[in-house]
């Protein structure tokens, strides 16, 4: 093959083909192949470009671990999601919708991390003056933040070698380019090459690297999927209707992926939320409880908090029932509705179902199924559930209420929030619970408590 060759690369998974294809054989994406030019390089040049972290072979027991390998980012919720703080060396990919606060939290982070060493903020989308104006608005210390606005990989590598920073933030990965890849910035090959080179640079220089990435209209990180495999941690920013931001880890080599960071956007930037329950529980007085509302306790990593599940049923407008739910998986809502029809005699097949979670948080836990079922029953029958009742349990297809994990933590947190009735599975022996074996019994108990009140 002479001169430049042309290949077609899937922008979703990075698969290469010699001709354009409508559907990717690897990931199944449609119309995802883009044309890329490939320049042949000699074997010697390719080997010289490959970085070497450590040539010496040694026993794992002989490896020395620096005590300062992990340090606080200065933002408690970010530390929680990262697994206890920033790890050196490491590479972190941060994704989220435009305007959600990715650049803001990274600028706040480098300002706080300056206490542990030099920091470098690489801006490929904003000018230095624009970054300065944002930093002044956030009331950050500008003296300790170094800014670099050249998005050429070669120039950035030289700057990092010269400065020797402890933390580097690149805003964003889509703006980087290298002369070894003959395509525009943001193409799959450019993103893959730049991400790999920077990750190796971070490992050889003991740097904590943060890469900000764009997302597609489906909410996934733009670029080939292989970029997520090259980094150590992948973080996603989500937002709710009331301005609360959620930070989740989709991948984390240094901690749990179950933790969640909760922030609120204010004039001076993103502020960690210490008590998240105030955003997810509506304040109501006695006899002020509407139908279709149920409370449950969810566990996210090491944290437990209360959430409010809201349900609404109305006659179907189009002749067949539809489910509208973007905070709880639609398949789960359909399954719980079928269980209610079969085992509780609740007719929902001619109803449009609307499900929401107060505060806009997305919930994937199976423990919410009992509360979801009670909220649907309450909305359909217009029966108000007790204001002081919280429920948690998984529903089987036979209508049984199955045990859930961390029951004691859920009871403790809900009790501290003022809930006195804890409706839980009969199979779990715990203090201060009202036990139920199946969904029909749970409804009878809830109806009895409502009449007592």
Image: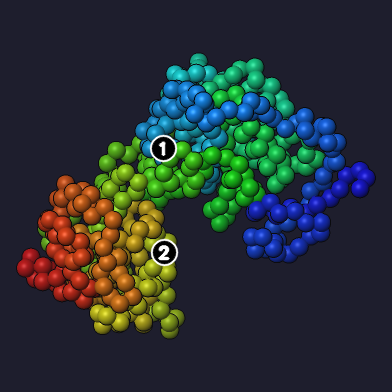
| Rendering quarter of residue 429 | bottom left
Could you tell me residue 420's position as x and y percent?
12, 55
Which residue is depicted at the point 29% across and 38% down? Answer: 274
In the rendered image, the vertical position of residue 361 relative to residue 120, given as above or below: below
Which residue is depicted at the point 18% across and 66% down? Answer: 426
Q: Quadrant of the C terminus?
A: bottom left
**Is 415 or 280 nearer to us in this picture?**
415
**Is 285 or 218 nearer to us in this picture?**
218
Could you tell me residue 436's position as x and y percent?
18, 69
- Is the residue marked by circle 1 packed among few (<14), some (14-19), or many (20+) residues within 10 Å? some
Which residue is depicted at the point 33% across and 52% down? Answer: 359
**Disc 1/disc 2 C-alpha distance (Å):** 27 Å
Which residue is depicted at the point 53% across and 18% down? Answer: 118
- Secondary element under disc 2, as helix, strand or loop, is loop
Can residue 194 be seen here?
yes
Could you tell me residue 107's position as x and y percent?
49, 29
Where residue 83 is drawn, which disc sits there? 1
Where residue 329 is drawn, which disc sits there? 2
| Rendering quarter of residue 355 | bottom left
């Amino acid at each position: 093959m002479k001169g430049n060759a042309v290949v077609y690369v899937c922008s979703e998974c990075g698969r290469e083909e010699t001709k354009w294809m409508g559907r990717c054989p690897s990931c199944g994406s449609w119309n995802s192949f883009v044309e890329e030019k490939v320049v042949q390089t000699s074997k010697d040049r390719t080997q010289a470009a490959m970085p070497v972290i450590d040539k010496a072979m040694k026993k794992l027991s002989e490896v020395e671990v620096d005590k300062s390998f992990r340090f606080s980012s200065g933002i408690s919720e970010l530390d929680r999601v990262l697994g206890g703080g920033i790890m050196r060396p490491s590479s972190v990919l941060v994704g989220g919708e435009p305007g959600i606060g990715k650049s803001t939290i990274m600028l706040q982070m480098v300002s706080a991390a300056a206490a542990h060493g030099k920091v470098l903020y690489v801006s490929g989308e904003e000018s230095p003056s624009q970054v300065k104006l944002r930093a002044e608005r956030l009331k950050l210390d500008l003296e300790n933040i170094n800014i670099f606005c050249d998005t050429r990989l070669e120039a950035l590598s030289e700057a990092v070698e010269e400065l020797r920073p402890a933390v580097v933030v690149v805003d964003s990965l889509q703006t980087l380019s290298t002369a070894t890849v003959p395509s525009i910035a943001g193409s799959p090959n450019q993103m893959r090459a730049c991400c790999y080179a920077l990750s190796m640079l971070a490992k050889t220089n003991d740097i904590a690297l943060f890469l900000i990435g764009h997302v597609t209209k489906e909410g996934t990180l733009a670029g080939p999927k292989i970029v997520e495999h090259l980094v150590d941690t992948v973080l996603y920013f989500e937002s709710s209707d009331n301005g609360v931001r959620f930070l989740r880890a989709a991948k984390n080599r240094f901690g749990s992926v179950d933790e969640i960071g909760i922030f609120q956007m204010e004039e001076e930037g993103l502020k960690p939320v210490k008590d998240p329950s105030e955003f997810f529980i509506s304040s109501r007085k006695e006899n002020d409880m509407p139908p279709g509302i149920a409370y449950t306790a969810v566990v996210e990593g090491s944290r437990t908090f209360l959430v409010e599940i809201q349900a609404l049923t109305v006659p179907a407008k189009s002749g067949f029932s539809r489910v509208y739910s973007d905070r709880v998986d639609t398949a789960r809502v359909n399954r719980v509705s079928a269980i209610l029809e079969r085992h509780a005699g609740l007719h929902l097949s001619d109803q449009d179902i609307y499900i929401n979670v107060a505060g806009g948080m997305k919930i994937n836990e199976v423990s919410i199924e009992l509360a979801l079922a009670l909220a649907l029953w309450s909305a359909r029958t217009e029966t108000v559930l007790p204001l002081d009742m919280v429920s948690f349990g998984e529903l089987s297809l036979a209508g049984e209420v199955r045990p859930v994990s961390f029951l004691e933590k859920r009871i403790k947190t809900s009790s501290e929030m003022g809930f006195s009735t804890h409706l839980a599975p009969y199979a779990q022996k715990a203090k201060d619970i009202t036990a139920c074996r199946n969904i029909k019994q749970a409804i009878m108990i809830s109806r009895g408590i409502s009449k007592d009140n």
